Structure formats: C-alpha cells, structure tokens
Image (spheres, helix red, strand yellow):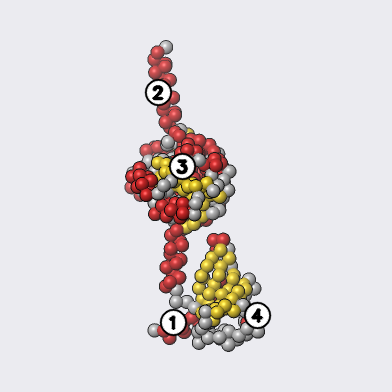
C-alpha cells in the first residue's frame, strides 16, 4: 500500500516507522525539518518538508497514487483542510484524520471525514481496565 | 442583516466598525481574551470570546439566523473550516473567507469556497500597480480575474497614435470601453481617432491580456528608455 502520513509528531513518526517496517510505501510530510530528521536512518520511506496542505508538497509526496492519507497533526483545522484536499481534489481512496479536540469531532463528521479520536480511545481503555479490575 | 465576523485583528476590527456604521447587526468572534475586551470597550456590539471553528461557539454567535459570515482570521486553515461549517452545516450561501497566502486561492476555490479575498495579493497588486511603468496595465479585476479592465497610455511611441479605432489590430476577446482625454470620457466608435496622452480602457480576460501587452512591447521599452 502507498500511504501518506501528514504530521511527524509522536503518533506520525511511530506509525511511519511501523508501517514502513511492515512493508508499506510511506511518505511523511511535516513543515518542521527537525521532526523529519528525527525519523533517523532506519526509516526507508520518503520524507517531504513543506506546508502540509500545499498542493505541490502533496504531489511531491505522491498523492496521486496514494491508497491512504492519514492526517495526524495536532492541529484540527490543519487536519480538516488536508483531508478535504486529499478527498475532494485528489480523490485519495481512503482518508483518515486524527481528532485532537474532542469537541471538534462534529466538524469532521459534518464534512464527512473519517476520524480516529485518541482521547476517546484512551479514556475507553482506561475505563474498561478499571471496570475489569472491579469484577 | 445579521452578520458574523470571525477574527478580531486589523481586518476584522475595521470590518466590524464599517458594518456597524452601516447599521448591520454584527457579532464578532475572537479567540484572544484581551483583544475581545479591547474591542468590546471600543465598539458597542456582541463580542464572543471563543474558537470560531467550534460549532457551539458559532451557534452562540447566532449562525442559524446569520445572513453573512466573514472569516477573516490570520490563519487560512481556520478560515476554510469556518466557511465549510457555514456552508455544509448551516446552509449559508454568503460566506466570505480572507486568504493570507495567495497560494491557497486555488485550493479554496476547489473546495467550494467561492467568495474569497486575498489580502496579500490585493496589497501586492496595488503596490505593483504603483510601480508599474508599463504603458499597458491592469486597473481592475472582476470576479477574481475572470474579467479585467486594462488601461493603455498613448505616448509618442505608441503605434496606435493617430489611428482610427476601426483600424486597430485587436485580439478577438476584448473590447474598447472608453477613452479618457483631458478628463473627459469618450465612448469610442469606429471613426474615433486616438490622440496623444489618451488613456484607453479595454475590457478583456486574463488569457488575452498577454496578447494585448505584446502589442505595445516595443513601444513600452522605448518609452522607458526615453524617460531615463
């Protein structure tokens, strides 16, 4: 699979390494070159430095042949904009965005963007651990 | 008319002031508390301190009853998201987005945000116009450049000098709209003669503009040299 990961923070970098090790073709985009460098030599995908929603940057990352685009930055508005561009302008088959502010989930839903919500997931896991202990 | 402005920076503040003067019912949404307080002290209007990309904040601002939404923050992502919420969530047809980076104009258009004002491009164009020594320049654009108004200055090197309008070799997609001569407007007909120091206004489109510019290429160069 050809996967573009937007945002090379903690989540983006870990996922890039793992998916790349699993044999997928990965392109990572971030506006901060230091964060891309932090991927190190072990990463054998493509890293592109630039404004995340810039069409030229997305093209350089190979968006026209991407199977997935994952927008994982810590800025919800940025994730929404990148997802809309990927979905509507470049017709990427599957676009998934990360929700940062739980209250923003409704905006993603309104614009038909598929999301993962880390806060919701983590709180669910913690809750079920506590409930599991009580049984 | 109920309108909502998002972003209380220089653009938002001045827009708010103008709309209030015209008697509009305006609500301002701004993220920064200090800025909110300053504006609320200065202008008698509803100021909401909050994130303009939050649906609940926009509901508080009365988006359901709003006729116009102006997203004028300094952040293009934010302005895009606000316009998308207004359009897809509340069916507001009149939402206007400020664009800070001219590179985003095409993206906004592709995503269906059709009313945009790019502050950077507008200022850059105005400055460029002031610097423009060309005898052929764009004075006004309509519908973001689909139609443009071009001004041609007639100097002694211009090969149009003393010709009749009907004899001009013009590209197909343009029309001579008017001639300004000694502060008088002339509406040119075929037998109108072009005289020295006329300024000719031509309506055309962006794709034809280079052709028109080419007509005066040599004249322009000579003119510039002579001025030195």
Residue nearer the viewer, B55 or B209: B55
Which residue is at a point 43% across and 71% down the rendered structure image?
B130
Say left or right for A37 vs A112: left
The answer to whether marks 4 and 1 sit on the same chain is yes
| Pointers 4 and 1 in contact (C-beta within 8 Å) | no
From the image, state whether disc 1 or disc 2 is nearer to you. 1
Where does label 2 land, which residue? Answer: A126
Q: Are marks 3 and 4 on the same chain?
A: yes
| Residue under pointer 1 | B224
Instruction: Classify 10 Å Cα crowding around label 3: few (below 14), some (14-19), many (20 and above).
Output: many
- Whether labels 4 and 2 belong to a single chain: the reply is no
Q: Where residue A70 sits in the image (x, y, percent)? A: 47, 41
Q: Earlier in the sequence, mark 1 or mark 3?
A: 3
Label 1 and label 3 in one chain: yes
CA gap between label 1 and label 2 equals 75 Å
Q: Nearer the viewer, residue A47 or B188?
A: B188
Alpha-carbon distance for marks 4 and 2? 82 Å
- Estimate the spatial distance between the alpha carbons at disc 3 and disc 4, rounded to whole Å: 54 Å
Q: Where residue B189 is drawn, which disc sits there?
A: 4
Tell me the quadrant of the picture where the C terminus of chain B can be found. Answer: bottom left
Distance from disc 4 to disc 1, alpha carbons, whole Å, reads 30 Å
């Amino acid at each position: 699979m050809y996967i573009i990961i937007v945002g090379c923070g903690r989540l983006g970098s870990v996922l890039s390494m793992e998916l790349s090790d699993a044999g997928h073709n990965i392109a990572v985009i971030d506006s901060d070159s230091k964060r891309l460098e932090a991927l190190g030599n072990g990463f054998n995908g493509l890293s592109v430095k630039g404004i995340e929603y810039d069409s030229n940057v997305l093209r350089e990352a190979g968006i026209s042949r991407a199977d997935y685009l994952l927008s994982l930055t810590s800025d919800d508005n940025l994730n929404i904009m990148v997802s809309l561009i990927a979905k509507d302008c470049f017709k990427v088959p599957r676009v998934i965005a990360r929700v940062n502010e739980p209250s923003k989930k409704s905006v993603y839903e309104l614009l038909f963007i598929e999301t993962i919500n880390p806060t919701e997931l983590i709180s669910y896991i913690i809750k079920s651990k506590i409930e599991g202990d009580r049984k | 008319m109920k309108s909502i402005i998002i972003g209380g920076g220089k653009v938002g503040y001045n827009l708010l002031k103008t709309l209030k003067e015209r008697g509009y019912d305006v609500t301002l949404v701004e993220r920064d508390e200090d800025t909110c307080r300053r504006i609320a002290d200065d202008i008698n209007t509803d100021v909401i301190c909050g994130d303009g990309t939050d649906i609940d904040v926009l509901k508080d601002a009365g988006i359901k009853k709003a006729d116009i939404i102006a997203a004028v923050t300094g952040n293009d992502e934010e302005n895009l998201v606000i316009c998308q919420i207004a359009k897809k969530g509340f069916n507001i047809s009149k939402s206007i987005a400020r664009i800070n980076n001219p590179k985003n104009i095409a993206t906004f258009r592709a995503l269906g945000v059709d009313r945009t004002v790019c502050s950077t491009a507008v200022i850059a164009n105005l400055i460029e116009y002031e610097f423009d020594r060309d005898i052929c320049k764009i004075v006004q654009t309509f519908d973001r450049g689909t139609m443009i108004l071009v001004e041609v200055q007639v100097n002694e090197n211009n090969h149009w000098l003393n010709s009749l309008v009907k004899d001009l070799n013009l590209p197909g997609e343009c029309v001579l709209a008017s001639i300004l001569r000694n502060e008088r407007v002339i509406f040119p007909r075929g037998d109108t003669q072009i005289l020295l120091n006329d300024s000719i206004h031509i309506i055309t489109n962006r794709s034809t503009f280079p052709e028109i510019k080419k007509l005066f290429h040599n004249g322009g160069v000579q003119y510039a040299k002579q001025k030195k």
